[in-house]
Image (cartoon, helix red, strand yellow):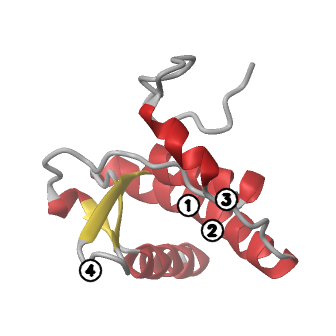
């Protein structure tokens, strides 16, 4: 069976009746995305594939995102970010996950950097 969330670490409490996360079951489920949100996430997934193909060979491991809740940078490897976006499409939530351990900030770039790099690459290839 294909795991649409491949790239995330396995749940260490899978099938454990004493899973401490079971307390979260009482929380409201995710809200399904509306059509505009769904389209935006699908576009992000397509863009992410392009960015990874362009930047991974150059040593970029993924994206850095400023967290609106804690106001700190969060570092996401390509596979983890892809899994998070896919989960948003499925049920409107993102699985909790551990932050990158001792990330090297120089190995990660922002969405804006990726967009600019992809645009510049496209324009370069159109000219030459």
* Marks 4 and 2, how far apart at CA: 22 Å
| Numbered badge on residue 44 | 2
From the image, tell me which residue sits under label 1: 48
Q: Is residue 8 above or below residue 114?
A: above
- Reading the chain from its start, which is encountered first: label 4 or label 2? 2
Task: Tell me how many marks there are.
Answer: 4
- Reading the chain from its start, which is encountered first: label 4 or label 1? 1
Is 45 in front, or is 67?
A: 67
* Marks 4 and 3, how far apart at CA: 22 Å
In percent of width and height, residue 118 lies at 50, 73
* Marks 3 and 2, how far apart at CA: 11 Å
Instruction: Name the quarter where the N terminus is drawn.
Output: top right
Whether label 1 touches label 2, CB < 8 Å: yes
Q: Residues within 10 Å of mark 4 (few under 14, many from 20)?
A: few
Q: Is residue 23 above or below residue 124?
A: above
Please name the residue shown 29% across and 50% down the image: 99
Is 113 in front, or is 128?
A: 113
Q: Is residue 48 above or below residue 90?
A: below
From the image, tell me which residue sits under label 4: 71
Q: Residues within 10 Å of mark 3 (few under 14, many from 20)?
A: many
Which image quarter: residue 65? bottom left
In percent of width and height, residue 19 lies at 47, 27
Number of the front mark, 4 or 2: 4
Is 107 in front, or is 73?
A: 73
From the image, tell me which residue sits under label 3: 88
Residue 69 is left or right of residue 5, and the answer is left
Please name the residue shown 26% across and 48% down the image: 100
């Amino acid at each position: 069976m294909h795991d649409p969330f491949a790239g995330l670490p396995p749940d260490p409490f899978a099938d454990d009746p004493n899973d401490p996360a079971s307390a979260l079951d009482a929380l409201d489920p995710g809200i399904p995305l509306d059509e505009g949100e769904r389209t935006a996430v699908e576009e992000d997934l397509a863009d992410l594939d392009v960015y990874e193909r362009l930047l991974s060979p150059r040593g970029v491991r993924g994206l850095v995102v400023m967290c609106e809740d804690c106001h700190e940078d969060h570092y996401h490897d390509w596979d983890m970010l892809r899994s998070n976006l896919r989960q948003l499409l499925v049920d409107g939530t993102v699985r909790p996950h551990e932050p990158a351990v001792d990330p090297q900030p120089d190995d990660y770039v922002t969405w804006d950097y990726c967009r600019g790099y992809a645009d510049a690459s496209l324009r370069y290839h159109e000219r030459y």
